[in-house]
Amino acid sequence: MSMIQLENLTKRYGTHVAVDGVTLSIAAGETCVLIGPSGCGKTTTLRMINRLVEPTEGRVLIEGKDTRSMRPEELRRKMGYVIQSVGLFDHMTIAQNVGVVPRLLGWPKERIAARVDELLALVGLEPRAFRDKYPRQLSGGQQQRVGVARALAADPPILLMDEPFGALDPITRERLQDELLGIQSALKKTIVFVTHDIDEAIKLGDRIAILKDGKLIQYDTPAAILKRPANAFVRDFVGADRALKSLGLLRVQDVMEPNPPQVGPDASLDEVRELMQRYAVRRVFVAEGRRLVGWVDREDLERNESIRTLLARRDAGTIAVPHHTTVREALSVMIATGFRIVAVVRGRDELVGWVPRAKLIRLLEDLEAGEVAS
């Protein structure tokens, strides 16, 4: 079922046509990414959905209802809105910022407080540590997390996001993209996301709408756009490295191997040596139960130290990727660290599988040959 329908949506400013007859449908629970060069009309299109900008022609339907028949405040209660500059109120605490819409809706104080704590935890901010702070005390990434929490506060079915991560450094940006994927997996909101970054679009979008000069050029799944760009503009916009970008369509959980090479923290070095030989690897993971706590290298065997002594100097997160991470990102981790294998974790540190670099290289070769169906 379509949650959002745009029908011949057009916006003119005098003689300038900002959006020109855009028609598309967004299914409930899907993420639609609007992308294109600067001035293509993507942000104007987004703002016509919640009537921050009124269309010149055409209409927007939400669950089949024309938005022109709805009061703007009624419409916006169905939608969370996240922007690049965050827009937090500096004079309010984090809890007060997140609770703005529930307060306007007349929720009881106890319900608001519980919702604030629930959402702060959801976006990775410990409630006791953050609820009484002010925006100026937070980093840019933390402020953006609060912006997402505030947009979700009244549990709207729709989330509009206008380049929310565009001003962040690459590491923070990638982390927040992963967190958004996790949130979307749990909540299944209908998301309309504006970006100028094709890699971000491929990573986050169920479908991508590519715009140019206000016109919709192609609207399809990331896999279809990479495989069959509609014209030369889309081909150039996506870039020449389409096979490498296709790795962004595959999740680590879809290609990981079960039964990772692992030992417990009290294992002997002989056990480690035997496991390395059996798996033909130079590194094995160390886990307590199912919790990843570190790794042991072949070079460690020469030091004759206990595994627990080695673990004290290591951060298990260095060798791990979340299960919903893209294969492309996993390959980037391997290249950056020099590791030939990575652990796959669910949640914070539950070891659920592993990926050897050789498997990812084979995948890339198959994609270049057109043998992998994304």
Image (tube, rainbow, N blue to C red):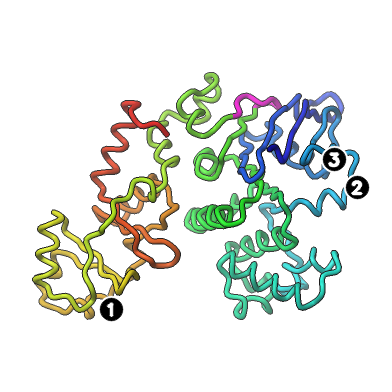
* Kind of residue at disc 3: Thr
Q: Position of residue 182 (x, y in %)?
A: 53, 56
Q: Earlier in the sequence, mark 3 or mark 1?
A: 3
Indicate which label's residue lies in the foreground, 3 or 1: 3
**3D distance between C-alphas at marks 3 and 2:** 8 Å
Q: Was residue 217 drawn as part of the magenta stretch in this picture?
A: yes
Instruction: Decide which of 321, 62 is in the foreground and name it.
Output: 62
Badge 1: residue crowd in 10 Å (few <14, some 14–19, many ≥20): few
Instruction: Decide which of 342, 63 is in the foreground and name it.
Output: 63
Residue at the spot x=55%, y=53% of the render? 185
Instruction: Decide which of 341, 300 is in the foreground and name it.
Output: 341
Question: Could you tell me if the residues under marks 3 and 2 are in contact, i.e. CB atoms within 8 Å?
Answer: no
| Pointer 2 residue | 71
* Kind of residue at disc 1: Ala
* Kind of residue at disc 2: Arg
Badge 2: residue crowd in 10 Å (few <14, some 14–19, many ≥20): few
| Pointer 1 residue | 312
In magenta, the rendered stretch is 212-219
Q: Position of residue 189 (x, y in %)?
A: 65, 50
Secondary structure found at label 1: loop
| Pointer 3 residue | 67
The secondary structure that most of the magenta stretch takes on is strand
Q: Earlier in the sequence, mark 2 or mark 1?
A: 2
**Lateral position of residue 70 relative to residue 361, left or right:** right
Secondary structure found at label 2: loop
Q: Was residue 319 drawn as part of the magenta stretch in this picture?
A: no
**3D distance between C-alphas at marks 2 and 1:** 59 Å
Quarter holding the N terminus? top right
Residue at the spot x=59%, y=64% of the render? 123
Residue at the spot x=76%, y=69% of the render? 99
Question: Could you tell me if the residues under marks 2 and 1 are in contact, i.e. CB atoms within 8 Å?
Answer: no
